[in-house]
Image: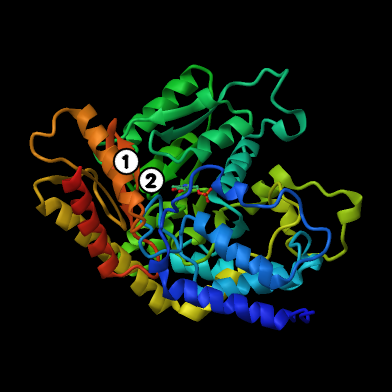
Amino acid sequence: MKQASTFEEDFARVGRWIDEYFQEPERYAVLPRVQPGDVAARLADAPPEEGEPFDAILRDFEDVIVPGITHWNHPRFFAYFATSSAPAAIAAEALAATLDVKVMLWRTAPSAAELEAVVMRWLGRLLGIPDAWTGIIYDTASIAGFTALAAARESLGLDIRDRGMSGRDLPPLRVYATEHTHSHIEKAAIALGIGHENVVKVACDAAFRMDPVALERAIEADSAAGMRPMAIVATVGTTGTTSIDPVDAIADVARRHGVWLHVDAAYAGVAAIVPEHRYLMDGVERADSFVVNPHKWLFVPMDLSVLFVRDEAMIRRAFSLVPEYLTTSDGNVRNYMDYGLQLGRRFRALKLWFVLRHLGMENIRERLRLHIALAQRFASWVDADPNWEVMAPHPLSLVVFRYHPRGAGDEEQLERLNARLLDAVNATGEMFISHTKIAGRYALRLAIGNMRTTEADVEAAWEILRREAVRL
Ligand code: PLP
């Protein structure tokens, strides 16, 4: 019988697999050619009674799992927001899993708690967040945003934490966003008992940015009607188009009316690391909370989202609840369980620390600059071709565009044409893009954010798009 392999051999095999995976992305269709149920049909109905050799499991990983993977780490993944995992972060994930600490009390993971605080200070300074703010790591922007809105609700002084919201004479609480705000804000409002209807969609200007005058009018009208403005959500880099709400002007309104200002920069915030894009942070120092996702554009694998907050005590007031078995005598320490719904938290700071140190800031800035430059180049090709059109401003690394051949017909026909084009392009397996609707018009999105994407990949994408468009 074959001797059981050692962990070291197994891990070396995994290391080789990872290396090859990154070296030969062309072996994989970016969007897999599987139908719903295909993968499940190839999996066993129940786990084995006896343990199986690592080899056999790894073989099935290659033969069954990988063919059903959408390759987010592929350099021609241009859909949604393109992301990527730096090798140092992959190694850090393995180390974090090895230690498997639960970052809940300081004493349950002292190094993890202290590294988190230090790396958050690094990141805060890179972005220009005031030193007095606190950075806390969450899994996703959705949860970080939910946490910020929970703190905003707590800051109203309505004693909702203790008395709840039902069976009481409370005014409707209002949250101000736009039609371009990411949907997690609406979900948070639903979960926090604010109610979906109380998320006000403030009007935008022609570049899809929140109109501060319309915001102020909405707040005044709501207050006059006996409602209670609770929070404004400004977005720096909206999901659809990366439009940038005027945070500074919005902060004026927030200050005048005493409303919590949350800034969602989940994708675009990272670009503020680059000096010429520091403008993205204009006014953020006057907000109350700010979210950025290193797992989007900072080469850190899912999941790692950061919430920076002006007054961390407000988060604790919303969430801290210490049962007897979690009391400690550790004194003046940060117990991260006090900052959200979760008790045990993963050691996420480790991978960000590895990435920032291993890539170095100069390298990171250059990559971000390259992505933005590649997007600008792509947009210029689209712009120069009379059969195509750019649909929105493209300040960063996302281009929103569509195929619009002369004599193409009305909006409905254009939508059908571009939806077919999207399917055709993605069916090639050579690249993957997604779509959105802007002001009711169907548009394609090409997002550049993968550390392995080169100019040749973007050129290839433009080739494929034109080739498939001609074929339709
Ligand atoms: N905010 C913005 C602007 C986004 O674009 C996204 C996702 O793309 C999110 C929030 C949600 O991010 P997460 O998946 O980390 O919850």
Residue annotated with mark 1: 209
Amino acid type indicated by mark 1: Arg
Q: Residue 302, percent across and down?
A: 55, 59
Residue annotated with mark 2: 238
Q: Residue 460, percent across and down?
A: 25, 63
Looking at the image, residue 411 lies above or below residue 54: above
Quarter of the rendering occupied by the C terminus = top left
Determine the residue positioned at 59% across, 42% down.
Answer: 146
Name the residue nearer the viewer: 415 or 394: 415
Determine the residue positioned at 59% across, 28% down.
Answer: 194
Spatial separation of the CA atoms under disc 1 and disc 2: 9 Å
Looking at the image, residue 16 lies above or below residue 347: below
Quarter of the rendering occupied by the N terminus = bottom right
Q: Residue 127, percent across and down?
A: 44, 64
Residue 331, located in which quarter of the rendered image?
A: bottom right
Secondary structure under tag 1 reads loop
Looking at the image, residue 409 lies above or below residue 360: above
The answer to whether residue 107 is left or right of residue 452 is right
Name the residue nearer the viewer: 384 or 36: 36
Determine the residue positioned at 44% across, 37% down.
Answer: 256
Q: Residue 67, percent across and down?
A: 50, 58
